[in-house]
Amino acid sequence: MQITPYVIVYFFLTFSLLYLAVKSTMKELKLFLGVIFVSLFFSAFEISLVSPELKFIFNQLKFLGIVFIAPAGFLFYSKFLNPEMVVSKPKLAVFLSIPVITIFVIATNNFHHLFLSGYEIKSTPYVSYVLFYEKTWFWVHSLYAYIIIVCAVTILIIGVFKKHRMYRGQNYAMLFGTSVTIFLNVLVILKVITSLGDISVMAFSLTGICNYWAVYLYKPTGVINMARSFAINNIQNPILIFNNKDVLLDANFSAHSEFDLKNLTYVDILEIFSGNKQIEYKNKIYNSVNENMVDEKGVSVGRVVVFNDITNIKKSLDKQEYLLSHD
């Protein structure tokens, strides 16, 4: 077995895709990542083994995943755009007929040579791989796959216009991964890239990673900020946010209502809210809690002050003290 940096990258991507597939809870994405993993797994052994016969066997085995990548991707994108979509079993059978026939054609190629007519071992400074000579059914399946991919890209583009602008980043990420993969696949088919072998499978791993990121890791900042603003504004306690120069940046609805902030000057705000634990304002007594905000480097960027109205508690305690002192 040949262990080169290129082979190590292949195996790293292989098990990265397996990890993402296991973590995914969306079955369509799990399927898509799974078939890419199968393709990468056999491709990794193809380029790492020395025996020409074994290299050819693993080259053919990788098609167990490759032939299903395009339809699995199409099903994922369709479900992502329309979560209510349900595909009936007869339609699914028709949809997968070409990939299934392709597997059969590859398995029986020695009898008819419809998929490939022969192969040779190609060695470059980076990798040793199988280069086979395509025949009719290879191009039939390639045409089917590219029609499916074009349809998938169309779905993603439609999704850009259908989704709220704050979620369009998901479609952009998927379009990026798919577009790069299509471009690299075309270069492989046209034999423009030969020094790295068949990188189309590796390119699909980029699509898988982009799709996983879009579904699980993409964080629309606008939505997060809206949610935080909504939560803060619906808290009954007054909340003030200051920068590191003690300039008031923001306040929730309760703070505006309780403290009449629009009529206070910068000096007034400093005098009233300058870090005191307890303040009195308009016949009310508040306890305040100051929390410093620091960035990822530990540098202070400001503070948040949360106030709690303790007027009734204070009056009750004062009353108790008065009664106790006059017993």
Image (tube, rainbow, N blue to C red):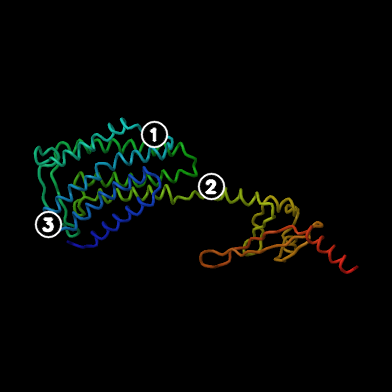
Please report whichever mark, 3 or 1, sits nearer to the chain's N-terminal start.
3
Q: Which mark identifies residue 148?
A: none
| Extreme residue in the front direction | 327
Please report whichever mark, 3 or 2, sits nearer to the chain's N-terminal start.
3
Q: Nearer the viewer, residue 295 or 33?
A: 33
Q: Is residue 20 left or right of residue 39?
A: right
Residue named by callout 2: 223
Residue named by callout 3: 51
121 relative to 243, above or below: above
Residue 245, percent from left and from top: 64, 64
Amino acid under disc 1: Val
Residue 196, percent from left and from top: 21, 54
Numbered disc 2: secondary structure: helix
Q: Which mark identifies residue 86?
A: 1
Q: Nearer the viewer, residue 23 or 201?
A: 23
Residue appearing at x 70%, y 62% in the figure? 288
Residue appearing at x 66%, y 51% in the figure? 235
144 relative to 236, above or below: above
Instruction: Please identify the quadrant where the N terminus is shown.
Output: bottom left
Please report whichever mark, 1 or 2, sits nearer to the chain's N-terminal start.
1
Instruction: Please identify the quadrant where the C terminus is shown.
Output: bottom right
| Tag 3–tag 1 contact (CB < 8 Å) | no
Foreground: disc 3 or disc 1: 1
Occupied quadrant, residue 80: top left
Q: Nearer the viewer, residue 122 or 65?
A: 65
Residue 317, percent from left and from top: 81, 63
